[in-house]
Each structure stands twice: as structure tokens, then as C-alpha cells.
Image (cartoon, rainbow, N blue to C red):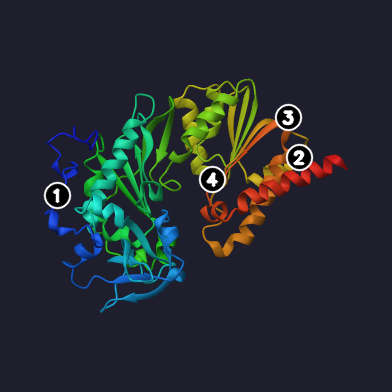
Amino acid sequence: MLRACGAAAPASVPALVRARLARPASAVASSSSALEELAADRKGLAKVVLKKGKTQIFRDGSPMVYSGSVDRIIGRPPPRTGDVVLVADGSEKPIGWGVYNSVSMFCVRLMQLEEEAKRDPASALNMERLLEERLCSAVDLRGSLGFPSTNTNAYRLINSEGDRLSGLIVDIFADVAVIASSAAWVEKYRQQIQSLVSKVSDVNHIKWRSSTDILKEEGLDMSEQKEPAPSSYSGTVKVMENGIIYLVSMEGQKTGFYADQRESRHFISTLSKDQRVLDLCCYSGGFALSAAKGGATNVTGIDSSGSALDLANENILLNKLDAERISFLKEDATTFMKGAISRNELWDLVILDPPKLAPRKKVLQSASGMYRSLNALAMQVVKPGGLLMTCSCSGAMTQSGLFLKTIQDLVDESKLKLRL
């Protein structure tokens, strides 16, 4: 099985070796667009032409071409969702290529720029080859960071735009790979993705999870989709992160575990010695367990999900923690904080990590109000001189700048009250 995809990759896994599929030197003329030369061999390849002034943001790395950035589409018949298309500037010169969606606000998800196509023509306009390359790069990168290791076998292998595969998440939990799909192109290439991921070292099972609500906005109704292949791994899997054991449910939120918060959980453990800690929206107890392992005197976790708290309580036993020092309560976070404020109950360290409140831009205003209310309450249950770690998993909130603005406004209001 594959450990790394570099030159030392074992010959027994030919599908994931980085050998370049060489083309004749004449195939890509240096004086013209590499993609134009390569596209000459592709009949019916459409070209998405950008509006004037809209090109640089994509040259700089933004992978999402919004429909509002598009001037016109050249090609007959017009491209269909999932088709590979060229993306061109106003003069119709290609700047890159990507996958098209006729319904989504993301008209094209860029996969490769012109300069990259010149360096690696084997992957240009070839989704199967590009997937192979990007997965290899992801395996190499995680390996260079030391994952997996003896004390961490839960980690994110593919991080969507972070690994330049927008709409695709792959989390590794021991020998299980959970693949989360939130783009139509990911569903189109499901078979190829599963095949590649199955070749990663130590992966023995695959769980495919389609984000049905997001995919509806991509023009896919998953209830009408025929199951292409079984991916029915269910139940729970035992994993380790930073030396802490967790049970991960294959039916839980997102991929079953928030692997992207690993470093934040470790950071909390370094702050927790001799502290009284409150973990709000704790799910299966990630921050709470880290705080307890870090030497907190008392840890309380709050969540409204009974099934999540069942996992959290099992995690206490798995880690042989003192039940007198850590406990979990089933309660709404807002209700709990209001009760704590009325009792004048305070904590040294408070973690607030609510679920996604702004799944899309059109609900930003209402979501910002909810974030404001939650954080205003959380600030009131922190001891003077204590710490609040607040999080948002709503990309629309963070990308718009609203999340930081909401927090800063609350801080400024608190300062003003102190002056008065």
C-alpha cells in the first residue's frame, strides 16, 4: 500500500506513482497557449470567457468562478454539469481549466492554470490524472507533517480548496476513509476517487457521505441518484489524536469527527492545567477531553445531541479519566449559559464551537445575529482575566469578514460598558 507518491513510491502501486505521461516536445508550443494546443485534440471542449477585469483574481489562486464573472460561453452544444471546460480572459486566451456547473453559483471550479499545464501537460484537461496527482501530493504533504503517527491516526487527507480539489473532503480515521462530497463533479468522479483513496496505506474501508443540501444547489437531487457502488461502512471506529482516544461515528456530524480542529484541541490542552473549563456545543467531547488530559481541575461539556454525548461519555471511559473531573450535560447551549449567568457561575476557559449557522450567503444576516447572541452570552460566563475560544465553521461568515466584525463589536461594547 502507498505511503508516499514521490520517486520512492513502491512499484506495486502503479496507479498512484508520479511517473509523467510524456508527450512529444512539439505537443505544447512554447510560443502559444499550452491549453490551446492540448485542447486542439478535444472535440466539443467549451470555453468560458470571463468579463473584463475578472481575470487576475483567478490567476492569483481563487478556484471558484462565480456565474457573475462570466461574460459568455463558447461551444455548441453548451457544456453540461461535470464537463471539463477552458476558462479564458476577455481576449479568449485560456488562463486555466476546470469543471463546469450549469446550475450552481459556482459556474466553474478551476483545477489547473495555464502555467501548470505547461509544466505538467499529462494532467491538463484530464480529471482522472489530475485526481491521481493531487492525491499523491496530499499523501506526501501529510507524510512530511508526520501523519499518520503512533499517537495520531485521525487526520484530514484532502481539505477541499486547501488541496485544490474544491468540494472534496477526505478524512482518515484509523483504517477508514470518509469521503465527503459537496460538488457535482465529485459525484461524477465518485468511482475514480474511491479507487484512488482505497490505495492509500492502511485504508481498508471507505464511507462515502454526500452533502445532500449543498448538492441540491449544485443541481443534484441525491434521492434520485442510483447508488453506483456500496460504501456502507457503519457503526463506530476507534481512533487516536494527540494520544487521546475517540470513538468516531460513521453516522455523526460532517465526516463523523472534526479532524480540522486537531491543533486547536492540542492548544486547549496546553492552557488547561488547574483551570475550570466549559466546552459549549461539545459534540463527542474533543475539547473537553483535551482539557481534562491537559490537567483541568473541572471540565463541563454541553451539547443538545444525546447520541453525541453517548460517544463523549464512552470517550471518558476509553481514556480512563476521572468522572469527578469531567462530565457532559444534554442541554441547549443558550439555555445553559442563561442559567449559568443567573447563578453567577463562571469558568476560567470557555470554548464555543457551534454548528454551521450560515450554510449559504443569503442567510448571513440572520446567522450573524445568532453568532452575536451566542458569543455575548459566552463572554458573560468567562471569569475576569479568563479566556474564550470562539469558532465558526460557516465559510460564508468568515469569508465575508462578518464573524470577526461581530466578535470585535462585542468586545468594543464590553469596553464601553466598563468605562461607564
* Label 4 – label 3 distance at C-alpha: 31 Å
Residue sticking out furthest to the bottom: 76
Q: Are marks 2 and 4 in contact (CB under 8 Å)?
A: no
Q: Which residue is identified by label 1?
A: 21
Is residue 229 something that shows in the picture?
Answer: no
Disc on the earlier residue, 4 or 1? 1
Counting residues from the N terminus, which is met first, the one under dot 1 or under dot 3? 1
Q: Can you tell which of label 4 and label 3 is closer to the viewer?
A: 3
Residue depth check, mark 4 versus mark 1: number of the one nearer the observer: 1
User: In terms of secondary structure, where does tag 2 sit?
Assistant: helix
Label 4: how many Cα within 10 Å (few below 14, some 14–19, many 20+): some
| Residue occupying image coordinates x 49% and y 43% | 307
- Percent from the top left, x then y, of residue 401? 59, 53
Q: CA distance from mark 1 to mark 3?
A: 60 Å
- Residue at x-position 16% and y-position 46%: 20
Compared to residue 212, the image places residue 259 above or below, namely: above
Residue 378: where, in percent of width, then height? Answer: 69, 41
User: How many other residues sit within 10 Å of disc 3, few (<14), some (14-19) or many (≥20)?
Assistant: few
- Real-space CA distance between mark 4 and mark 1, rounded to the nearest whole angstrom: 51 Å
Residue linked to disc 4: 305
> In terms of secondary structure, where does tag 3 sit?
strand
**Label 2, label 4: how far apart the Cα atoms are:** 22 Å
Q: Residue at x 20, y 64 (%)?
A: 37
- Find the distance from the CA under tag 3 to the CA under tag 2: 17 Å
- What percent of the width, then of the height, locates residue 19? 16, 43
Q: What mark, if any, has residue 341 been given in the picture?
A: 2
